[in-house]
């Protein structure tokens, strides 16, 4: 039986209390192994190790040496590509083509991009003349914040974890990672990589468990944690912000979304449908940036509904390593129940179910997996819960619109503000509309195209702060000013 241990001060440790919980494969419900839950003693030990490491070798080495180590981490992830791939696929059930093209390569790239960024980062400096005619030179210095708690979701486990660990370590911090209870494997495996390349003990730590009353809460409430970076649900973000208030610890929050796509009649229809197929259904709709509301200009409304229906029906569910598979299961039975409850609500609220709406018919050996059908609805008012709430499943509602003002009103009338995708060949209109949508990220004629130097994050209930390139340094460093008079 496989065991997922905590990784503390460079060593794999069991739960002292003996508390373990199951890790199940969402493809067929089979048991992958047992996860050792970190209690307060393990969390205390992980934070103590991270704190001690700040003043050890890690705190003394130059930026160049630090970058060499992180470069070695990236190379070692790539050398062990298949181990990471197998681990991520077992935990999530996502198709091989997705994990091998997105999750694992980005896991390594997230170290490389922040090496490049830190090496070329500069700070401000100002010269001024003092009242007595001399000169005062001010300059900024960026220092690590200290021990960073990294709390992660399950949808892109390695990618989203290293998106935080990469910049945190590049800036000289140490980390204690709490992966999702659903996806413990790749964070655990990364401990082996850290040891193999010689990252000092205590710099990277992993504690397993749940949120309230478990590792997540113990970690975020720990007084020696100097900053908390979180990706997950908005509701959880609120709980973590309350924990962070004690001790006035800074937070970075990447939260939920209810993202819209706006399709104008002059769009390139092939590009639009290809992109919507991905943004609505890829990763079984479990992408925070994914589209769950599609607004289509009336002249091409029926055409888009028909074309997207065809694409939804082409999302063949199946096993991750079957080349015919286009969509995997959702992460767990619990999440399957949540997604299906929205499918039920849509029917109750009077939706036309264009396609899907239930569980696909799977062969006997996959029946116990957490499968849901890609689903499209039409005909609901903007107040319907499948249009207002984040579902985080492979589904969308499609509505027609007649004017820019109308669609802007609808897109912005939502508490979330993470991402939008706009499709039109009128570049003036695309930019005009993009600048009036209340979100952190807008794509025009594309989706999830990433340049890791750019800012990433959400507005309104979708988050606080920006990550990516130099923007990550706002959170992972403390900016100090030095003024010298001469
Ligand atoms: P979640 O909020 O349920 O859990 C995320 C993590 O928080 C898990 O590790 C969990 O154990 C931990 N946690 C839960 N309660 C806690 C508490 N009180 N204190 C400390 N830790 C706690 O989210 P999820 O279901 O894992 O992920 C899906 C959600 O994440 C969706 O809402 C999605 O939109 C969001 N998400 C956002 C982004 C983004 O960049 N904005 C990216 C990916 C996912
Ligand atoms: O690509 C990224 O850096 C990123 N943060 C993606 C988030 C996806 C959400 O599910």
Image (cartoon, rainbow, N blue to C red):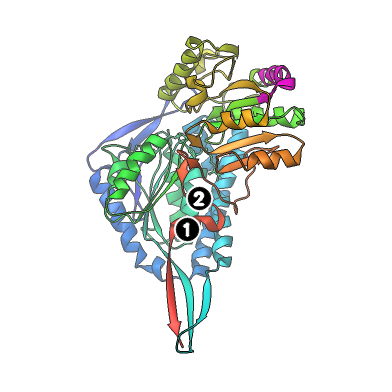
Find residue 378 and report its horizontal and vertical position in percent: 60, 16
| Mark earlier in primary sequence (2, 1) | 2
Among the 4 quarters of the image, the one containing residue 54: bottom left
Report the residue marked by disc 2: 466
The overriding secondary structure of the stretch rendered in magenta is helix
- For residue 136, above or below residue 150: below
Residue 474's disc number? 1
Among the 4 quarters of the image, the one containing residue 404: top right
Would residue 301 be counted in the magenta stretch? yes
Q: Quarter for ligand 1?
A: top left
Find residue 183 and report its horizontal and vertical position in percent: 43, 36
Instruction: Tell me where the magenta segment starts and ends, as one range.
Output: 296-310
Would residue 266 be counted in the magenta stretch? no
Among the 4 quarters of the image, the one containing residue 328: top right
Residue 282's disc number? none
- For residue 166, above or below residue 444: below
Q: Secondary structure at mark 2?
A: loop
Find residue 285 and report its horizontal and vertical position in percent: 55, 28
């Amino acid at each position: 039986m496989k065991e997922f241990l905590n990784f503390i001060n460079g060593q794999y440790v069991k739960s002292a209390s003996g508390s373990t919980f199951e890790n199940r494969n969402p493809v067929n419900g089979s048991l992958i192994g047992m996860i050792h839950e970190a209690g307060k003693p393990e969390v205390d030990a992980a934070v103590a190790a991270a704190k001690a490491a700040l003043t050890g070798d890690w705190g003394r080495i130059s930026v160049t040496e630090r970058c060499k180590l992180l470069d070695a981490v990236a190379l070692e992830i790539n050398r062990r590509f298949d181990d990471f791939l197998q681990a991520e696929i077992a935990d999530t059930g996502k198709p091989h083509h997705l994990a091998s093209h997105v999750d694992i390569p980005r896991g390594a790239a997230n170290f490389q991009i922040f090496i490049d960024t830190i090496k070329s980062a500069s700070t401000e400096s100002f010269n001024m003349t003092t009242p007595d005619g001399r000169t005062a030179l001010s300059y900024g210095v960026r220092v690590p914040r200290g021990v960073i708690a990294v709390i992660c979701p399950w949808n892109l486990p390695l990618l989203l974890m290293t998106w935080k660990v990469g910049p945190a370590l590049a800036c000289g911090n140490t980390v204690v990672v709490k992966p999702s209870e659903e996806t413990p494997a790749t964070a655990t495996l990364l401990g082996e990589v850290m040891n193999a390349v010689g990252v000092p003990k205590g710099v990277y730590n992993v504690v397993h468990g749940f949120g309230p009353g478990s590792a997540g809460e113990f970690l975020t409430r720990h007084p020696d944690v100097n900053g908390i970076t979180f990706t997950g649900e908005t509701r959880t973000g609120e709980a973590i912000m309350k924990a962070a208030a004690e001790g006035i610890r800074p937070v970075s929050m990447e939260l939920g979304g209810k993202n819209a796509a706006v399709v104008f009649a002059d769009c390139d229809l092939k590009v639009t449908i290809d992109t919507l197929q991905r943004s609505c259904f890829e990763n079984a709709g479990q992408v925070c940036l994914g589209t769950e509301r599609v607004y289509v200009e009336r002249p091409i409304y029926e055409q888009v509904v028909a074309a997207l229906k065809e694409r939804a029906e082409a999302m063949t569910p199946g096993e991750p390593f079957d080349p015919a598979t286009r969509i995997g299961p959702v992460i767990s039975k619990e999440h399957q129940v949540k997604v299906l409850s929205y499918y039920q609500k849509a029917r109750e609220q009077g939706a036309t179910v264009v396609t899907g709406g239930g569980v696909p018919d799977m062969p006997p050996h996959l029946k116990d997996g957490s499968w849901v059908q890609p689903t499209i609805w039409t005909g609901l008012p903007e107040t319907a819960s499948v249009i207002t709430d984040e579902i985080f499943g492979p589904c969308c509602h499609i509505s027609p619109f007649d004017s820019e003002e109308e669609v802007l009103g609808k897109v912005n009338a939502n508490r979330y503000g993470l991402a939008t995708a706009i499709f039109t060949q009128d570049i003036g209109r695309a930019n005009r509309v993009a600048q009036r949508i209340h979100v952190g990220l807008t794509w025009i004629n594309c989706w999830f195209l990433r340049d890791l130097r750019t800012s990433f994050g959400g507005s309104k209930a979708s988050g606080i702060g920006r990550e990516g390139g130099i923007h990550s340094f706002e959170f992972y460093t403390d900016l100090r000013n030095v003024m010298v008079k001469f």
